[in-house]
Image (cartoon, rainbow, N blue to C red):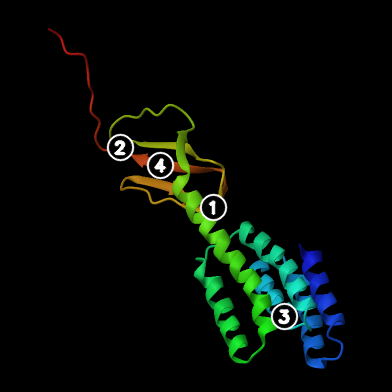
Amino acid sequence: MRILAASLLIASALLSLGNTALFSVLVITAVITWLYWSKSPIPLSLAIIALTSLVTPPMDMALTSISTVLIDNALKTGNERPWWFYAAPLSASILLAIILRQFYIAASLSIPLLYILAISLINVIRFYTITIELRPGRELRVDAGSELAYSLTVLTRPRVRALMEVRAPKGLRVNPARLYMNGEASIKAIAGITLAVLRGRESH
């Protein structure tokens, strides 16, 4: 992805040789992207989308379409923001481009916007249809008044990538409480048992 991101910026710079300011920004962004892609893929992806939309049409639409691959990959590596966090600035940019009668720019930016809206809708549908299963690492037995430490595996069917946040009830501590999962994740749990109920067979 780093090579693709830098290549898109370099190609955009070559296509913008007549525009000194845009050419300089593209070259500088290409260097920054190469150095910091692994640390900030999402903001850099959005910056690349914005810059490639400024290239002379119709190449802007082609470059912006390809750059959508970058935001797709970046969002899959870890995203804690809601869908509107990305859709709102793109929508505002499209509206501004239309007001300024820059219809090619508006059309270019609509490609990643439609992607974000579509993938967000698909994810909402998927998360409402998945099944979540919890599996303790061993049989759980403990005496009242003591603590029980055990591992807990969380599985999803079908397999999904997601940021998982565990909200444990009172008396239960989990670590980590927030982590990324890819269909399966493991957490450590410590339960404090203050009361135990023993049920035996009734005699007649």
Q: Residue 129 appears at what percent x and percent y?
A: 46, 45
Q: CA distance from mark 1 to mark 3?
A: 29 Å
Q: CA distance from mark 4 to mark 3?
A: 50 Å
Please report whichever mark, 4 or 3, sits nearer to the chain's N-terminal start.
3
Q: Amino acid at mark 4?
A: Ile
Q: Nearer the viewer, mark 2 or mark 3?
A: 3
Query: Which label sits on residue 51?
Result: 3
- Inspect this view and state whether residue 176 appears: no
Q: Amino acid at mark 1?
A: Ala
Please report whichever mark, 2 or 1, sits nearer to the chain's N-terminal start.
1
Label 4 sits on residue: 190
Please report whichever mark, 2 or 3, sits nearer to the chain's N-terminal start.
3
Query: Which label sits on residue 36?
Result: none
Q: CA distance from mark 4 to mark 2?
A: 10 Å
Kindly identify the residue that appears in the image at 32 percent across and 45 percent down.
Answer: 171
Query: Which label sits on residue 162?
Result: 1
Extreme-left residue of the structure:
204
Report helix, strand or loop for mark 2.
loop
Label 2 sits on residue: 193
Q: CA distance from mark 2 to mark 3?
A: 58 Å
